[in-house]
Amino acid sequence: LVPNDARVCPFCGKADPAGPLRCPQCRSPVEKNWLACSHCGQQLQVTCTACGKKTPLEAACVHCKTSLTVICPNKKCKHSQPQADVCIKCGTPLK
């Protein structure tokens, strides 16, 4: 019912309905311990701004539980995504 490359469930609105192990940029399958996506090169680990430790790109830091996601400021988009320079859905600058 929900396409594997869907960013948002069309029924409930949940982000990443196909599961958390997809690249946030290109939606290719990734492994939890990968540093970057083998398809597009997207970094899959970030430094947490709260505790300073490396953590996988997930909704929250695995060490201190601080949120790692940002909401696109574009009122038509509002996509929740990992911290980046631009929105991965619409291209709006995030900083």
Image: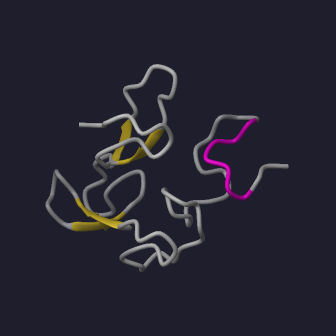
63 on left or right of 74: left
82 on left or right of 28: left
Q: Is residue 95 above or below residue 51?
A: above
Residue drawn at 40 percent across, 66 percent down: 42
Q: Where's residue 93, x and y in %?
A: 31, 36
| Pick the front one: 26 or 55 | 26
Image quadrant holding the C terminus, namely top left
Residue drawn at 65 percent across, 35 percent down: 13
> Any magenta on residue 6?
yes
Q: Classify residue 35 by image quadrant.
A: bottom left
Main secondary structure type of the part rendered in magenta = loop
Q: Classify residue 41 by image quadrant.
A: bottom left
18 on left or right of 24: right
Residue drawn at 85 percent across, 49 percent down: 1
Residue drawn at 42 percent across, 57 percent down: 58
25 on left or right of 94: right
Q: Where's residue 85, x and y in %?
A: 29, 46
